[in-house]
Image (spheres, rainbow, N blue to C red):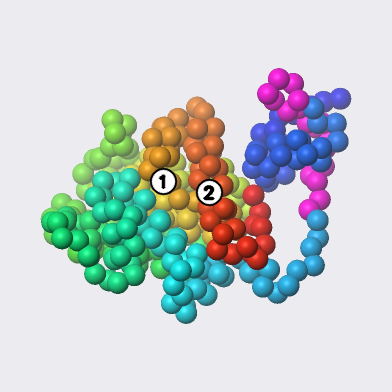
Amino acid sequence: MEYVSVEETANRWGLSARTVRNYCRLGKIPGAHQVGRAWLIPAQAQRPARKVRVTKQADKMTLLDILQAERARHQKGGIYHRVQIDMTYNSNHIEGSRLTHEETRYIFETNTIGREMPVNANDIVETMNHFRCMDWIIEMARHQLSEKMIKELHLMLKNGTTDSRQSWFAVGGYKKLPNTIGEQETTAPKQVSAAIRALLSWYKEIQHPTFDDLLEFHVRFERIHPFQDGNGRIGRLILFKECLRTNHIPFIITDDLKYYYYRGLKEWGREAGYLRDTCLTAQDRFRKLLAYYRPDFVKMQP
């Protein structure tokens, strides 16, 4: 009998490798067996059927439906409230913001600063702007990602900052000067527009993006690094949006995962497991958050 790897099976079935391993461990794939730490799966194995559940209408809601509903009614203390604060704090903190989680929450809830010590004005402006970006991606989540949307996100994030007053800084436009990710070179300014269009063209050809497809898009976007600044935050906003659009559990990269996340971006293409495992860890945390706020919420696809 011919056997194939977990990764090959996952690609063929359109699932994550993690889900396929779980199927193996639960005995849902006849003939699958473990050799060392690896699972071998019969090449002709069929994807296990999901159980058909009879659910209430409320159970058919997606996470996006819930976020949009809570936002529309200005609900406090729900999952939308928590996502706005956690995503904004962590994504900005990765990029050097000195605001605390509590200060970020205070700004979101009261639209005031609530700090006696001096604070960098850009941190405040970009926090407020990030809240608007989150609202926008929740509103636009079902729309196909486009070059115009990416530029609008950047305009929204950087509007009113010190950078926006610099002649060499294109707010809502692609970079004019070369930049790097650490010491890693990125796409040259004159090639950015073509690179983004090629990336979007590749992505649009994928009818049902897997979790790895979303990560692949994120890595390619970050390696292009199309804007002078704000690329990490824009990339993570897009990734969150696309998780909602494709019905994958989204995730938030927290401070303790930051260095693993950076390593994953760097090593993708040589070792995809670094980024994949980091993001799956973050996804598991988000799933627990969902279970707390919406215990009635039906589980989404892996």
Judging depth in this view, the residue of 276 and 69 nearest the camera is 69
- Farthest-out residue, front: 116
Q: Is residue 83 left or right of residue 232?
A: right
Estimate how packed mark 1 is, as few (under 14), some (14 to 19) or many (20 or more) residues with alpha carbons within 10 Å: some
Which residue is drawn at the image coordinates 69% and 25% (left, top)? 38
In the orientation shown, which residue stands out farthest toward the top? 36
Residue type indicated by callout 2? Arg
Q: Position of residue 264 (x, y in %)?
A: 45, 34
| Image location of residue 166, percent across then percent down | 13, 55
Instruction: Give the answer, above or below, for where 277 lies relative to 171.
Output: above
56, above or below 157, in the image: below
Q: Secondary structure at mark 2?
A: helix
Q: Mark 1: which secondary structure?
A: loop
Q: Which residue is mark 2?
A: 285
Along the viewing direction, whichever of 208 and 116 lies nearer the viewer: 116
Give the residue drawn at x 68%, y 42%. 19
Count neighbours of disc 2 (C-alpha within 10 A) and say few if under 14, some if 14 to 19, many if 20 or more: some
Horizontal arrangement in the rendering, residue 157 relative to residue 25 (left or right): left
Return the disc, 1 or 2, that comes first in the chain's sequence.
1
Q: Which residue is mark 1?
A: 254
Q: Nearer the viewer, residue 191 or 184?
A: 184
Residue 218 picture location, percent across and down: 45, 46
Q: Quadrant of residue 191?
A: top left
Is there a contact, CB below 8 Å, between mark 1 and mark 2?
Answer: yes
- State which region is magenta: 34-50
Residue lying at 68% horizontally and 68% vertically, measured from the top left: 59
Left or right: 148 in relation to 172: right
Residue 46 can be seen in this image: yes
Question: Residue 220 has which mark?
Answer: none
Residue 46 within the segment the image draws in magenta: yes
